[in-house]
């Protein structure tokens, strides 16, 4: 198996004479990308995603650590000998070359003659939806078409690993959606291992088999999109994944307490007090008026169900869902329900929120 293994890789930037610490550090990173996997590096700008990608590509040397591809150590191997393809934010096509010559350029560097490489280039242009565009030049194409040419050029040489650095960030939203669908299809069709850098969690959710969430040069969590969304192991991960209802409080003897409410989360007594946050996903909550509580009894008859008492402060219908805000103690809790699930209520109504503790997540402040 040609897995990519990153073992305690470190990279430092900006350290000058007299500085105690560098301006930015890629902390010791350990990561494995499996053969054939679509893996996303997800995080805010400046978190180290592109730095790590460039170290893997061989464009930057690491200070410490090793990179293995399959059984081969490639840490010191020049970029051109790694057999990886790379797509950047800009298409970086050769303006003086035709589209098909741009696509065939990598094959030319491999010593493949023109008679063989041009048919391969044309076939790949057809695969990315640009059949018949081979004789044009890059300046005659739109931004989305140029990125399609870049994609064709990167995969026509059958790279061992395809590295993509936010390749769609400069495109209009409609073109971005088209390119995402194209890359997803290309990955499924050609079974290429892809390492994809993005700050857009929607993009990562759509494309990735697994992802790593990064911040300040460190990897906070690795998992499938569903695992990271439903079970974040760090408050920074929960925040970046767009979690709502992140409630600060204390867990003590199985009970979570925050301003204005007290609820039993676990059957087991927790002797040691723990400060932290309770994460309640809006779509996992149910809100009913207290006099209509029996409406949900059939769904919440087991011992894992908990209730919170509050007051409805806002309710609206948007994009097929009811969006509710319920004040519980001093906390505003968001609830998201499909039509038919919510009991219609008025501003100021007394509301009971029901939730299954198996879908709640407590994140301790200190581990």
Image: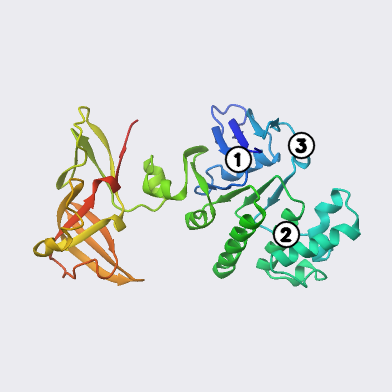
Nearer to me, 156 or 263? 156
User: Total number of numbered labels?
Assistant: 3
Residue 153 position, x and y percent, is 75, 57
Residue 341 position, x and y percent, is 24, 66
- Quarter holding the C terminus is top left
Task: Find disc 2 in the rendering and name its residue.
Answer: 152
Nearer to me, 322 or 185? 185
Q: Which mark is residue 78?
A: 3
Quadrant of residue 114 within the rendered picture: bottom right
Nearer to me, 271 or 91? 271
Q: How many residues crowd around disc 2 within 10 Å: few (fewer than 14), some, or many (20 or more)? A: many
Residue 47 position, x and y percent, is 52, 43
Does 153 sit above or below residue 67?
below
Residue 150 position, x and y percent, is 72, 59
Does 100 sit above or below residue 19?
below
- Quarter holding the N terminus is top right
Spatial CA distance of label 3 from label 2 is 23 Å
Q: Which mark is residue 52?
A: 1
Quadrant of residue 300 within the rendered picture: bottom left
**Which tag, 1 or 3, sits closer to the chain's start?**
1
Q: Secondary structure at mark 3?
A: loop
Q: Judge from the rendering whether residue 322 lies leftward or rightward of residue 191; answer left or right.
A: left
Q: How many residues crowd around disc 1 within 10 Å: few (fewer than 14), some, or many (20 or more)? A: many
């Amino acid at each position: 198996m040609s897995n990519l293994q990153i073992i305690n890789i470190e990279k430092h930037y900006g350290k000058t004479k007299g500085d105690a610490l560098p301006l930015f550090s890629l902390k010791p990173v350990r990561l494995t990308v499996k053969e054939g996997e679509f893996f996303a590096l997800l995080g805010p700008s400046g978190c180290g995603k592109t730095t790590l990608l460039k170290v893997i590509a061989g464009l930057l040397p690491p200070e410490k650590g090793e990179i293995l591809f399959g059984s081969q150590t490639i840490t010191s191997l020049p970029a051109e000998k790694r057999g990886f393809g790379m797509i950047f934010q800009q298409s970086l096509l050769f303006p003086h070359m035709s589209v098909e010559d741009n696509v065939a350029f990598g094959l030319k560097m491999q010593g493949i003659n023109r008679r063989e490489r041009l048919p391969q280039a044309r076939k790949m242009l057809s695969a990315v939806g640009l059949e018949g565009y081979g004789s044009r030049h890059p300046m005659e194409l739109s931004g989305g078409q140029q990125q399609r040419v870049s994609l064709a050029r990167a995969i026509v040489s059958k790279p061992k690993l395809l590295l993509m650095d936010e390749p769609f960030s400069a495109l209009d939203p409609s073109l971005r959606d088209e390119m995402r669908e194209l890359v997803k299809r290309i990955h499924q069709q050609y079974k290429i291992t892809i390492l994809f850098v993005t700050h857009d969690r929607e993009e990562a959710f759509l494309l990735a088999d697994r992802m790593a969430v990064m911040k300040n040069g460190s990897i906070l969590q690795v998992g499938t999109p569903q695992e990271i969304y439903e079970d974040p192991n760090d408050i920074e991960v929960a925040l970046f994944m767009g979690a709502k209802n992140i409630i600060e409080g204390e867990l003590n003897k199985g009970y979570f307490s925050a301003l204005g409410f007290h609820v039993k989360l676990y059957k087991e007594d927790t002797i040691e007090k723990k400060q932290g946050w309770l994460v309640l996903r809006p779509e996992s909550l149910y809100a009913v008026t207290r006099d209509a509580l029996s409406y949900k009894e059939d769904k919440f008859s087991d011992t894992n169900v908990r209730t919170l008492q509050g007051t409805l402060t806002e309710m609206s219908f948007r994009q097929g869902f009811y969006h509710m805000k319920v004040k519980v103690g001093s906390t505003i809790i968001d609830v998201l329900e499909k039509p038919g699930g919510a009991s219609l209520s008025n501003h100021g109504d007394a509301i009971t929120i029901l939730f299954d503790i198996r879908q709640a997540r407590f994140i301790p402040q200190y581990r």
